[in-house]
Image (cartoon, rainbow, N blue to C red):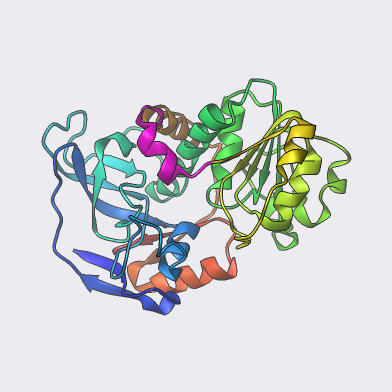
Amino acid sequence: MKAVQATQFGSPSVLKVVDLPDPTPGPGQIAIDVSHATVGLIDVLFRQGQFKDVPGMAQPPFVPGLEVAGTVRALGDGVTGFAIGEKVVSMSAGAGTGGYASVYIAPVQGVVSIESSHVDPALAVAMIPNAAMAHVALTLVAKLVEGESVLVHGALGGFASGFPSIARQLGASRVVGTVRSGKLEAAANTKLPYDRIVDSAELPGVLAGKRFDVIIDPVGGAVRDQSFALMKPGSRLIVAGNAAGDWTHAVKTNDLWLGSMAVTGFNAGAFLPSHPQAIRPGLEAALKAVASGLCDIPVDVLPFSEAVTAHERMESRDLNGRIVLTPQ
């Protein structure tokens, strides 16, 4: 099979297109002929070596990539409900690698059929896995209640963009997003179902004293600091990433006590293996959201040979949607 391999930790230039043996599915697994593989910030962090000392994380040489779209190539023992040639999307498996390849092995519980949805596979893989994780985060971690309000930082980012549609499905009364100043033009043209998107540099004043029940923060740093002024008793701040790169950020727990607020982390790679029952409802909710047009974002499709360019753009934040790679 053709694959993009990180030959060592480092800059985007360490990504090389290579030929590797075709893998075969084991029990409970599906082999997928990949048509599209999503490029995410987590792929960049893995390639940079940010998690190189974390047990179980990929070590070079490895194939990045968490989510793929394609067609079923082969079924492992015990797998039912899927047919050879069926169009599918898969969420992350194992350590969250292997997606930038023409063949991908996925656990059946993380695969959803898009055969009858008529959703473009590039959009499907760009949005379904993240919207599914948003469903898990909002239902099991934030425990969103109908009528509550939601604030999403980094509103147009890959993971963040999955939240507004799912929040709407769950009955949120108001969904507001924040973006960096340079993203305001793109925010004005987005089709994602936000009530409003504001400049994160102008927080908290730009929201005129409004406070939120749930705040989703995949950004961190100064944006996370500003979030506490936007919370009220009973609010939940979900720490869902660190795009700002501030690895020393701290929270004053006495402030949480005095404000009666909660802060919790959500890392799908850690959460989902111990909550596998949440995956299927998340995938079904995400497919419904995408098929109904609530997750329409720009998607750039690049060949494997331009994986270096894709990672350079991710690092420079030179995109207003998502990038997916294709073996073709």
Quarter of the figure that contains the N terminus = bottom left
Is 23 a magenta residue? Answer: no
Quarter of the figure that contains the C terminus = bottom left
> Magenta stretch mostly in which secondary structure?
helix
The location of residue 25, given as percent across then percent down, is: 15, 46
Q: Closer to the camera, 42 or 75? A: 42
Residue sticking out furthest to the bottom: 13
Res. 46 image quadrant: bottom left
Residue at image position (50%, 73%) is 312
Q: Closer to the camera, 116 or 314? A: 314
Residue at image position (14%, 38%) is 27
Please state the extent of the stretch shown in magenta in the rendering: 266-278
Res. 15 image quadrant: bottom left
Q: Closer to the camera, 56 or 284? A: 56
The location of residue 162, given as percent across then percent down, is: 54, 41
The location of residue 63, given as percent across then percent down, is: 30, 63
Please tell me whether residue 61 is drawn above or below residue 43 in the rendered image.
below
Q: State whether residue 40 appears in this view.
A: no
Is residue 314 shown left or right of residue 213? left
Q: State whether residue 77 appears in this view.
A: yes
